[in-house]
Image: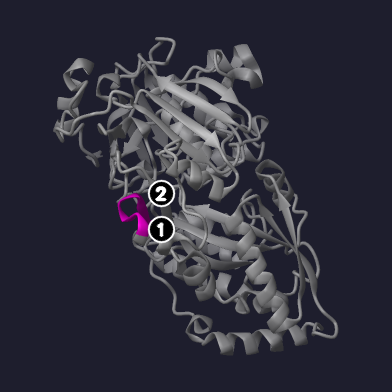
Amino acid sequence: MKVITKTIAAGIISVAMLSPMAYAKKHPITGEELAANQTYTYRLLDEIDSLDPQLIEGVDASHVARDLFEGLVNQDTDGNLMPGVAQRWVATPDNMSFRFYLRQNAKWSNGDPVTAHDFVYAWRRLADPATASPYSWFIEIMNVENASAIVSGEKEPSTLGVKAVDDYTLDVKLSQPMPYFPKMVAHTSTFPVNQKVIEKFGADWTKPGNMVGNGAYVLTEYVVNERSVRERNKYYWNNDATIIDKVVAMVINDENQAYARFKAGEVMKTDIPAGQFQRLLKENPEETKSMPQLCTYYYNFNMTRAPFDDVRVRQALSYAIDRDVIAERILGAGQTSAYVFTPPKTNGFVTPDLAWEHMTQKERDQKAKELLAEAGFSKANPLKLAILYNTSEDHKKIAIAISQMWKQKLGVDASLENLEWKTYLETKKLPDYDVSRAGWCGDYNEASTFLTLMMSDNAQNDSKYKNPQYDALMKESTGMADPNVNYTQAEQLLARDMPIAPIYHYAEDIAISKYLKGWPYNNIEQNIYSKDLYIIAH
C-alpha cells in the first residue's frame, strides 16, 4: 500500500490545541479582531429537499449537511483534501482497495463515538433499494464492490465491499481501479448516519431534537419554507477551533428581496440578482464576488416524448440558443457559454473540438432552421413546447429569453411552466415535461462526475438518453490510467445526439459581507464548511 495523503496540517493542530477563550477576541491565525456575535445568516433560494445525507439531492442541502455531518475527508479553502473523520488513508498499488484510519476522538452529537461501523451502515443504506436514494447511482460510480448488484436488487446490502476491520479502521474494495477514489468520499451521500437514531425515529429522525449528527453543528430549529438554525456541537472533535456559533438559513425566493435584506444587514450572503452584477460590482466591489464553479446550466430534452425523440429537433433547438447573450448580457457575472457538458476547468479534462462551437451564431441559426424544416416544422406549422423550470428569477429570465430566440428564429411556440423545487424534481424524473431547465455541479473534481449522468441507467439522466456506445465508453473509462480520452469521445457523442443543450458554465456570483471571512473562493467545487468561517469585529 502507498500513502496517498497527508496527516493533519500543523496549522490545524495548533488551532485545535487552543481553548475557545484563547481566540474569543482575536483569530488564532490571522490575528484579526473577532466580532462578539458569531452568527452567520444567509439566504436560501428554496426549501431544501432533505437533511438525510443518503436522501439529499440539491446543492444547498449538501451545504447544510456539511455542517451537521462529517465524512471521511473534508476540503480546505482551495479544494484540497483534508482529514475529516479519517486521519489518514492508504491505497493498494493497483488502486483497487483503500484503508481509512479513523480518529478516535470523533463523536456523535449525543456523545457516542463515531466508528467504522457507522460508515458501513451508511454506505449499505445508500446502496439499498429500500432507501430509494436519489444518489444510489453514486456508490455505483464509486465502483464499490457489488454496489451495482445491490442497487438493482440482485444482492443483499451486506455484500457491499466495505468492512469495519475494527472500530477505527475501514476497508473498501472496488470493482475497478479508482486512483481518485478519496475525492469521492467528500460527497455528502457517503457521510455516516446513526443507525440507532434512524431505527428509533424512522423518517422523523432529521427533525430538531431527534437528529444526531457528527458535524460541527447540530440542528436546533427548522421551520419549513422559512428558516433553519444550526448551533455548535460541543462533542465535535475540533469544536475548540470552530468560531461561528450559529448558522441561520433563511428561505427567500425573490432574489431582489434577498439582496435588499443583504443591504439591510439581515443576511450576510445571497445571490446577485440576474443582470445586476456589473452595476453592483462598481457600486460595492468589496462585497460583490464572482468565482469559477464546477457547474453547468443546461436544458434537458425529454427523449421519451415526440418530437424530442428526433435528433434534428433537439439539435435545432440547441443551435438556436445564443449562449453569449445569456452568459454575458442576461447574467454577466463571469459565466461562460457552454457547448459541452463538462466544464473546461475540470481537472484533466480535454475539451473536444466541436464544429458547431466554431460556427457563428448566424450560421447556427441557419442550420437550426434547416434541421427543424427537415423534421416537419416551420413558422406555418410551429413546434409547440413547454419549458419547465423551478422558482427563480434567473431561471425565468433565461427561459423567457430562450423562448423568444426560438420563436423569432424558428417560429417555435414555447410556453413557460414554473414549479417549486420538490415538485419540479419529481416532474423532471418521471419524466413529465418537454424541455426542462437543469443544473449540475460536480460531486468531485473529475469529468466522470458530469458524464456518468448521461449513462442509460443513471437516475439523474432526466432526458432518458440511451446510447450503448456512450455507456461502453464510460464503463471502460473507470479502468483506464488516463480516462480523459474516453471523456472527450463521450462529449463528442453528446454533441452529436444532443440529449441536452449545454447553455453556460457557472460562476458563483454572490453578495457577501465584508465582515465574513474564510470563504473558499479558490475551491472550484464551492464546498462550504461553516466551521471554517468567522466574522470580524465591525
Tell me the CA gap for discs 1 and 2.
9 Å
Question: Can the viewer see residue 145 in this picture?
Answer: no
Horizontal placement of 484 versus 222: left or right? Answer: left
Helix, strand or loop under label 2 = strand
Q: Is residue 335 magenta?
A: no
Residue visible at 75% across and 49% down?
Answer: 430
Tell me if 490 is positioned left or right of 299 in this view: left
Foreground tag (1 vs 2): 1
Q: Residue 174 at x, y = what percent?
A: 44, 41
Range of magenta residues: 283-293
| Mark 2 Cα-neighbour bin, 10 Å: few <14, some 14–19, many ≥20 | many
Which quadrant of the view contains residue 50? top right
**Residue 56 location, x and y as percent?**
56, 36
Residue 518 visible, this angle: yes
Q: Is residue 166 above or below residue 535?
A: above
- Quarter residue 516 falls in: top left
Q: Where is the C terminus found, in terms of image quarters?
A: top left
**Residue in front for this viewpoint, 232 or 82:** 232
Classify 10 Å Cα crowding around label 1: few (below 14), some (14-19), many (20 and above). some
Q: Which mark is residue 166?
A: none
When the figure is inspected, residue 442 is found, relative to residue 18, above or below; the finding is below
Q: Is label 1 in contact with label 2 (beta carbons under 8 Å)?
A: yes
Residue type for callout 2:
Ala
Identify the residue at image location x=80%, y=84%.
379
Image mark for residue 280: 1
Quadrant of res 394: bottom right
Identify the image quadrant of the N terminus. Answer: top left
Q: Horizontal and vertical percent for residue 246?
A: 40, 24
Provide the secondary structure element on which disc 1 rests: helix
Disc on the earlier residue, 1 or 2 = 1
Q: Which residue is mark 2?
A: 511
Give whichever of 250, 444 is nearer the camera: 250
